[in-house]
Image (spheres, rainbow, N blue to C red):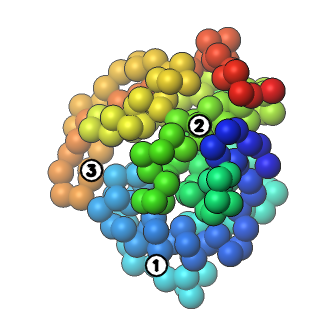
Amino acid sequence: MITGQLAGLRARHPDDVATLHAGLYEDVPNHSRSDSRPWRPLTLASGHSLYEPDGPSDDGKAAFSVVDLATGELAGEALLWGIDPHNRGAHLGMSLLPGARGRGIGAETVQLLCHYGFTVRGLHRLQLETLADNPAMIRAAQSAGFQVEGTLRRSAWVYGAFVDEVILGLPADEWERPSWQN
C-alpha cells in the first residue's frame, strides 16, 4: 500500500466492487460527471462492473482502491490511465464515495498518485481533465502543483448539457513531494 497521512492506495479487492458500484456507479448524475463514457445499466451479476480488479496484463492502467487510514474503510477509487511508456506520461483520475468527500482525502490521493506515477513508474508528466465546475478537484490538483493548461469549451456531454473541461498538467520536475512523504 502507498500511504499518506489520511489515505492509502492499495490494490482493488474483489469485495470493494459492490461498494464502489453502489456508491459511485449507481449515482447516475455523479457518475455522468466523472466518466466520459455514457452511463448504462449494469448489474454486478452481469460481470461487467467497471470496478472489477484488473489483472496484471494491462500496463496502460493502474487502478487502486482509496482507503481512509483513520477508519480502514474504502473511500473510493483512483487510477492512472492512458499510461504511455514512450512519452512517459499518463492521465490521473479518481472518484470518492460521498462520505469521504470534503475531508482532504482527495487532495492527498492526488499526491499519492503523483508519487506512484513519478517515483514508482518513472513517468515524466501527469495530466488530468475535470469539469470546469469541479472546484474541489481543481484545488486538489493545484495543491499538488498541477497548472491549468487550457479549457475545452463545451466539450463534455454531462447529464443533458455540454459543459467545459479544464486540462491540468504537471511535469515531474515541478512536483514538490509533500513533507509527509518519504
Badge 3 or badge 1: first in the primary sequence? 1
Residue 98 seen from this side: yes
* x 45%, y 59%: residue: 99
- Picture quarter with the C terminus: top right
Across and down, in percent, residue 28 comes to 33, 67
Q: Quadrant of residue 72?
A: bottom right
Q: Mark 3 touching mark 2, by CB under 8 A?
A: no
Label 3 residue SS: strand
Which amino acid type is shown beneath numbered disc 2? Glu
Q: Nearer the viewer, residue 160 or 2?
A: 2
Badge 3 or badge 2: first in the primary sequence? 2
Circle 3 sits on which residue? Answer: 157
Circle 1 sits on which residue? Answer: 42
Which amino acid type is shown beneath numbered disc 1? Leu
Q: Which mark is residue 66?
A: none
Label 1 residue SS: loop
Circle 2 sits on which residue? Answer: 108
In the rendered view, tell whether residue 42 sits above or below residue 53.
below
Badge 2 or badge 1: first in the primary sequence? 1
Label 2 residue SS: helix
154 on left or right of 49: left
3 vs 2, front mark: 2
Across and down, in percent, residue 41 comes to 40, 78
Q: Nearer the viewer, residue 119 or 96?
A: 96
* x 74%, y 42%: residue: 3
Q: CA distance from mark 3 to mark 2?
A: 28 Å
Q: Quadrant of residue 14?
A: bottom right
